[in-house]
Amino acid sequence: MAGIIFLGPPGSGKGTQAQILAQSLAIPHISTGEILREAITNQTELGKQAKAYVDGGELVPDELLLDLIRERLSQPDAQTSWILDGFPRNIAQAAFLDELVAELGQSCQWAIDLKVPQAVLIQRLLLRGRKDDTEETVRRRLEVYEEKTAPLIEYYQQRGKLHSIDGDRTPEEVAEALKVLVS
Ligand code: AMP
């Protein structure tokens, strides 16, 4: 096995699915969103620097995350396989990850894009009720996704790593499709 990246827009179910898949493969699930939310709750230095960006639906500056990803992928439990959920989020982060993975002698095999229609995303995000899920932030997060993150679909397609999965189904059906894909 090797590294797996979850792309998908906010509300696509990537967090849930990344967690289920990581558990079933018994590999680390690394969610930058979760790491940031925890840092904000604990008011760590990272949390203080990230808060305004996360609250506003913007991406946090790359510098806040690059060292953190380097350290996490260097841990013993991440030497062969991992799931990255929410990273990379832009082309610069993807280029960084390519270099890092090569440097660490690892490989990333799949970039999974969960496809969900925009109207369904908005409905799901507003129902979810997370702190950064207010109507205005939801709109901004979807815009930021289109602008910064969606170009990664082509980036990974060009590298032969992209796999699109229909995310507009029950969580169980999506989980099953993902399991089949990586098995
Ligand atoms: P998520 O849980 O993946 O939707 O992430 C929640 C929020 O954390 C995002 O809206 C961003 O503000 C921030 N975030 C998470 N991952 C990244 C990343 N790779 N680069 C920049 N910001 C991120």
Image (cartoon, grey):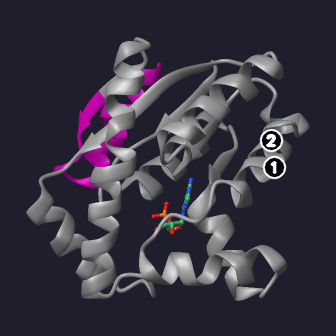
Which disc, if any, is residue 25? none
> Nearest the camera: 77 or 103?
103
Q: Which residues are magenta?
A: 164-183
- Most extreme residue toward the right is 76
Position of residue 158 measured from the top left corner of the image (x, y, whole percent):
37, 14
Q: Marks 1 and 2, how far apart in space?
A: 5 Å
Q: Main secondary structure of the magenta part?
A: helix
Residue at 70% in and 43% down: 28
Mark 2 near ligand 1 (CB under 8 Å)? Answer: no
Magenta residue check for 175: yes
Q: List the residue tagged with mark 2.
A: 70
Q: Is residue 28 left or right of residue 172?
A: right
| Badge 2 amino acid | Arg
Position of residue 77 measured from the top left corner of the image (x, y, whole percent):
83, 37
Residue at 27% in and 52% down: 146
Residue at 80% in and 46% down: 72
Position of residue 70 measured from the top left corner of the image (x, y, whole percent):
80, 41
Q: Is residue 1 left or right of residue 170?
A: right
Q: Is residue 40 left or right of residue 12?
A: right
Q: Pointers 1 and 2 in contact (CB under 8 A)?
A: yes
Q: Secondary structure at mark 1?
A: helix
Q: List the residue tagged with mark 1.
A: 67
Residue 56, quarter of picture: bottom left
Q: Secondary structure at mark 2?
A: helix
